[in-house]
Amino acid sequence: MAVKKLTHTKQGMKPVPPHSEVKQIDFQGLKWIDIVKPTKRHINMLKEQFDFHELLLEDCMTEHQRSKVDDFDEYCFIVLHFPRYRKETVTMETEEVDIFLGPNYLITLHEGELKPLVGFFHLCFSQERAKAEYMSKGSALLLYEVTKRLFDYCFPMLDKIDILLSDINREVFKNSSKSMLQTIARTKMQIINYRRVIKPLRPVILMLEKVIKKYLPEDMDIYFDDITDKMEKIWDMLENSKEVIESMDETFSALTNQRINNLLRTFTILQVLTLPMIVVGGLFSMNVDGIPLHEYSSAFWIVFGMIMLPTGVGAGIMFWNRKKWF
């Protein structure tokens, strides 16, 4: 039983320094080759060591290929996408894992950003007991352990979204600020991006469940039913989160519109209340002959009363109406 780091030379596969991006674990005839940030050199290495189709190797160099399963006689090629939460930008991003699965090998190619995959490989790489536990039943069950951890990694991100939804639910009736609108929009975008990653995975996992059977020991196909259940649970939770955030968005929009309408109504009432002042003041300020009351010493108070009386009556009616006194 050997654990090796490999590089490609003219003489074949030879050990390389620890910083290499290509690592391999050998256990009881099963190989797990993990390639982080694959380059053309790594692809050429796979091309010479395995009889993979050139188009599949080109797919490994292409960013964000669609999730898929390509089944061949001696191996299958799998592309899986998983969400990754980035704290710095508070966004949901997509990470890709390219996988070659054969009867006695598993090859994973990725960017090193998915913690469950990186951590699980390190566990098997560094601990003999982990190799014995996870690599003793064949390549398909090793793939199951990888995908199970990647799907389990999705649930904490769903928990983060649930916490955000709970916070929004508490604040939506209290906070009408721009920050609340941004929080709702940001959460909505996270859910959209999450759904965009998971939705194409559903038919792929169902197909993988069928394709993988030829690599599984007898009576072991039930394992991948667990992956399907996890995926469906994630999708159901996303559907629920989508409905909740859309309802909250509609509620916030309705409350905002109501506040705007109330504000506009207040401005309209103020304009109506000041209308007598504007009209009477405008009439009596004209510089023409024959203005009524112009020669009376108490003309100012008469005009003042003419202005304030309708204004006061209007204000009183509005006050009584708000108090529902009539």
Image (tube, helix red, strand yellow):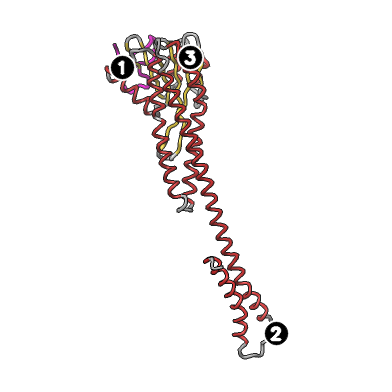
Classify 98 as above or below 84: above
Q: What's drawn in magenta, residue-wise?
A: 1-23
Which sits in the foreground, 233 or 116? 233
Q: Which element type, helix, strand or loop, lies under badge 2?
A: loop
- From mark 1 to mark 2, how far is it between C-alphas? 105 Å
Which sits in the foreground, 274 or 313? 313
The percent coordinates of residue 127 (x first, y second) are: 27, 19
Q: Quadrant of residue 85?
A: top left
Q: Which element type, helix, strand or loop, lies under badge 1?
A: helix
- From mark 1 to mark 3, how far is it between C-alphas? 24 Å
At x 42%, y 46%, the residue is 167
Which sits in the foreground, 326 or 185? 326
Name the residue furthest front.
326
**Amino acid type indicated by mark 3:** Val
The residue that label 1 is drawn on is 133
Does the segment drawn in magenta span residue 20?
Answer: yes
Q: Earlier in the sequence, mark 3 or mark 2?
A: 3
Crowding at label 2, few (<14), some or many (≥20) Cα neighbours within 10 Å? few
Does the segment drawn in magenta span residue 210?
Answer: no
The residue that label 2 is drawn on is 291
Which sits in the foreground, 43 or 99? 99
At x 37%, y 16%, the residue is 32
The percent coordinates of residue 13 (x first, y second) are: 37, 12
The percent coordinates of residue 226 (x first, y second) are: 41, 22
At x 62%, y 82%, the residue is 303
**Amino acid type indicated by mark 2:** Ile
Task: Assign the N terminus to one quadrant of the image.
Answer: top left
Classify 73 as above or below 92: above
Q: Which element type, helix, strand or loop, lies under badge 3?
A: helix
Crowding at label 1, few (<14), some or many (≥20) Cα neighbours within 10 Å? few
Q: What's the mark number on residue 211? A: 3
